[in-house]
Amino acid sequence: MISKWNYLPLTSDEQKMETALAAKYASCPPVSELLVQRGITSVEEAEKFFRPSLSDLHDPFLMPDMDKAVARLNRAMGLKERIMVFGDYDVDGTTAVALVYKYLRNFYSNIDFYIPTRYDEGYGVSRRAIEEFAEQGISLVVILDCGIKANEEIEYARSLGIDFIICDHHVPDQELPQAAAILNPKMDGSTYPCRELSGCGVGFKFMQAFAISNGLPTTDLESMLDLVAVSIAADIVPMIDENRIMTYHGLKRLNSNPNMGLRAIIKICQLSGREITVSDLIFKIGPRINASGRMQCGSEAVELLVARDISEAFEKARNIDQYNKDRKELDKRITEEANAILEKRGEKESDKKSIVIYNKDWHKGIIGIVASRLTELYYKPSVVLTLSDGLATGSSRSVQGFDIYKAVEASRDILENFGGHTYAVGLSLKEENIPEFTRRFEEYVAANILPSQLEPQLDIDAYLNFSEITNEFVSLLRRFNPFGPGNQKPVFCARNVIDFGTSKLVGRNLEHIKLELVDNTSGKVFNGIAFNMARHFGHIHSRQPFDICFTIEDNKHHGASGAIQLLVKEIHTGQQ
């Protein structure tokens, strides 16, 4: 599917801001434009952006209830209470539990961790888990990446003498659980500067406040930012403000002296000796940690991440790698089954603005991935449901710019449970309510989605001539890392480029094009790769001009050190 290419020039006010930066980056004009697009308006701000500093992390006590949370934790430790660290079974939850548990056990031994099983207990804290905690003499639970809607469960825990400190980042309801403290930057009335922390990020801020309150150095805590970086990348939270600072320093840790469990995964992923990037966290490391909770139990992921013995870490990493292989096979099969159903429905020709699909036999741990695949394929908000413990349980994913949380919330009166973010929501409902939910979901989406949100868009950051792609420009571009939502890798457009005469088809089925391109502004030949674009090869080979949208990548497979490659996202030949 060909995207609509969008380029939004700087406004007159933004152009004035760019002027303030132009002198500093005069030799690389696109850099000042890229900075202004990211809200950076002065050389001082630019220097901070290019050198993320831990000293710029916000005071954790700016978060509502932080003083209460720290006081309750300090009291529990002072009274030798038994503490349980509890979290969700996904990447964000397991990294959060690993970070808090691993940090606190440096100072306190009467502590344990618990990850619920997706299939026996489901999402969040259950009455069953609370009863187990009561039997074990647990009097304080630190719950991470979930809990913000566990009103009944936490009230039940209080009746058994168990307090909860909630560390969550999901959207809260009006009525909040009666916890000892609730740490959530999305709380109504919160003025915490970074609203979009990951669940692990909230846990980090809690531990940062704990360290400050006890006069502890933060070195040990900061050494765990590799876990926070994995959570931020995998949960796709905005790469701005504190998230960008923590990811920047977490990546430095991953590339120098990572957590022992992460080191084992890095070796399993064959990333040893290479620079690890956000893309590696999203596509290689994160899915393996996630596979533990999807296929077996997330507690094994935590055991890996808190391992002290390298042989134990490698054993856990090998298990998790196998879970990921199994997950891929299931993912492929269920996606094919779902797509076959939708093709039979005539989904591509349908006027419907959303997808809801149900199969009671699909694997519960895979449906979120399948929802993502369907959204990418059909470019519609998608909900995938299966049957679990007598309820239709599902995951939803959205298209760019559309708030699927509000779309699901519009049917809350027929839902048993739901929760999540703007782009991803989990939900459960009675099987007999699926038709009504499908009708309402489509009605809400049709009434609120913009036509432009139903077609793929490719946003262009800047137009580039090949003469502007200098070593200095590429060096500055690398300093825009780490990339993610809110600080996406810049996409450039070059017009009227032509084949140098040496481009060729590559790949097992000759489906890709290895490009060697020139334009009329530079004599330099640029290497590029265009995946799955063999359909354009005839035009390219005829040496007619065409336009490309691309990102600039370090070519890790190229022999020359520091070589770059244009990763071509789309080609326009004028013959589409």
Image (cartoon, rainbow, N blue to C red):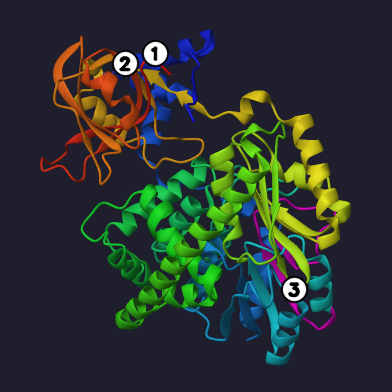
Give the alpha-carbon distance from disc 3 to disc 1, as whole Å.
54 Å
Q: Is residue 221 in sight in this rendering?
A: no
Look at 85% across and 80% down and name the residue there: 159
Look at 43% across and 19% down and name the residue there: 576
Give the alpha-carbon distance from disc 2 to disc 1, as whole Å.
7 Å
Numbered label attached to residue 170: none
Q: Which of 555 and 373 is in front in this view?
A: 373
| Label pair 2/1, CB-CB below 8 angstroms | yes
Residue 554 at what x, y percent from top left?
A: 24, 39
Magenta segment boundaries in residue numbering: 159-183
Residue 168, quarter of picture:
bottom right
Q: Which of 9 and 360 is in front in this view?
A: 360
Q: Name the residue under label 1.
A: 574
Element marked by disc 1: loop
Does the magenta portion include 545?
A: no
Q: Name the residue under label 3.
A: 389
Direction from residue 2 to residue 367 in the image, left or right: right
Give whichever of discs 2 and 3 has the lower sequence position: 3
Q: Name the residue under label 2.
A: 546
Q: Is the magenta stretch mostly helix, strand or loop?
A: loop
Element marked by disc 2: strand
Tag 2: amino acid: Phe
Mark 1, other Cα within 10 Å: few <14 / some 14–19 / many ≥20: few
